[in-house]
Amino acid sequence: MKLTARTFGLSLVAVAVLAGCAQTGPYQQDRTYRLTILHTNDHHGHFWKNADGEYGLAARKTLVDRIRAEVKAQGGYTLLLDGGDVNTGVPESDLLDAEPDFKGMNKLGYDAMAVGNHEFDKPLSVLKKQARWADFPLLSANVYQGGQRLFKPYQIFNLGGIKVAVMGLTTDDTWKLVNPDNIKGVEFRNPIEEASRLVPELRAQADVVIAATHMGHYEDGRHGVNAAGDVEMARAVKGIDLIVGGHSQNPVCMKAENVTDKEYVPGGPCRPDRQNGAWIVQAHEWGKYVGRADFEFRNGQLRLVKYALIPVNLMKSVKAPDGKVVKTAYTELIPEDQHMLAYLKPFQDKGQEKLGVEVGRTDGKLEGDRAVVRKEPTNLGVLLATAMMEKAKADVAVLNSGGIRDSLPAGVVTYRDVLKVQPFASTLVYADLSGKELTDYLAAAARMTPGAGAFPQFAGVRLLIENGELKSARIKGQPIDPTRTYRLATNSFVAAGGDGYPKLAELRGFVNTGFVDADILKDFIAARSPLRTADFRPGDAVVRK
């Protein structure tokens, strides 16, 4: 694919000058340097292309190699950065601790990555192993253990005389987004406060300052229940030239000042956000795009010349002349790098062996898309909660929607499908609570904001919630009796206080069964195959006003 001006993206006519760069490097006065930043984020185990041939590290390598060669031929320099969350999302990767992903990133020549919250989905020993696999630094300035930074806070690159500092930052929501057992003794300090102290130090050492972050991009800084993100940091901390972000998993393309283009079409022009002198970019998720930001640096000043999100073989559905719906690429297809394919195939084959086994069948789709399941009850949410409730012989079950990572398809369901829905290996726990304790717990769950990963899915209970407040709760048609004992089932993540839920482990009658959630789901489907989706319709069991 030849990268023409059209496929490359929007030429910014009114480019902004980023002034105030420290002139500490031996760059030559009156010389124009070309600097290209390539970026990805929220890879989530997608080292292999999907069934439609979209994304994957092999096609990504072809694209990155071409851009590097083009930039080098023009006398420029490139950096390839990632905004974090390499881990969790594809079973073939999850089973192998993301070995194909980190080692594949080595072959792509990544220069640095931010540490994401999903890097803590497994014990710290796994993360340390991944850091050893990586030939590039995992950066985070605000993660501490024992009073010391757990990761390198930044890396300085000398690109032909221009000194470029890349600082890493991790969302301070991480403590509530992962299993607390995995982060004992780890402290996630406020990244904005950390950046405010570190940026002046970096400006004294470098000509360009980049923040590789896993904090999220929230339109006009409206972050809701989430921790503050890139917009809020840019407004609070002067001196950052570029923020390469992740976490919110959206393409950051602005329709107008502080207004995101929510109808962005792959391959179309994309203008990144701009706050307080900092450009903010993010490349959606899964390697669907490679972001490309072309800068010119001259006499201590940096300006953005062009920016684009380049689709990696993304497909759209169109109706053919014969009436059939077919898939076609948004832009010219990028061939896969054959050496990368050969390297990754043994990892893919190893995973396929374990994951292709049929578990059961369903008569329709069970909805787990994050845009839906984090805002409303769904049939998949009810199914998962029901499976937990029955396994624990509980009266009621609740789970966080952030633990639901995909939908279950209509028709054949494989073990792979199950692990895509529940990849975190949380265990089933239960607690025997008084009616008052259960009501208090359900009230806390009711306050979880729609749109957040904490948003609850239920089984066994009918609730009326008004403006986030629990107004009534019934089990088996009866109001909860404050003096009776009820059994509540949930997962180990929620029980340990994950996503801000009340901790259950200290209560009497608390039991961790040791049963892994995905295995419970697998057995539930197998025992009832074919599943009738109508049996799990949420209906009016949970009413929000």
Image (cartoon, rainbow, N blue to C red):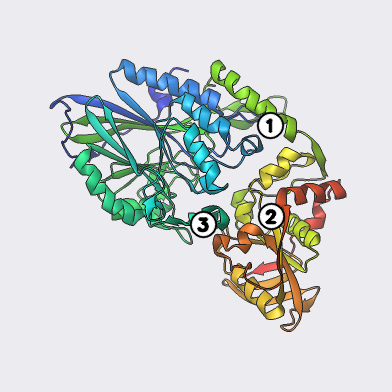
Q: Relative to the observer, which residue lies in front, 359 or 230?
A: 359
Cβ atoms under marks 2 and 1 closer than 8 Å? no
Mark 1, residue position: 351
SS type, badge 2: strand
Instruction: Residue at 74%, 34% (x, y): give it.
Output: 354
Identified by mark 3, the residue type is Lys
Distance CA(mark 2)–CA(mark 1): 22 Å
Report x, y in % for residue 155.
Answer: 33, 37
Distance CA(mark 2)–CA(mark 3): 18 Å
Above or below for 327 versus 237: above
Q: Relative to the observer, which residue lies in front, 320 or 39?
A: 39
Mark 3, residue position: 184
* Mark positioned earlier in the residue sequence (2 or 3): 3
Q: Quadrant of the C terminus?
A: bottom right
Instruction: Residue at 53%, 34% (x, y): give it.
Output: 288
Q: Residue furthest bottom?
A: 483
* Mark positioned earlier in the residue sequence (1 or 3): 3
Identified by mark 2, the residue type is Thr
SS type, badge 3: loop
Q: Is residue 182 left or right of residue 261?
A: right
Q: Which one is in front in this view, the residue at disc 2 or the one at disc 3? A: 3
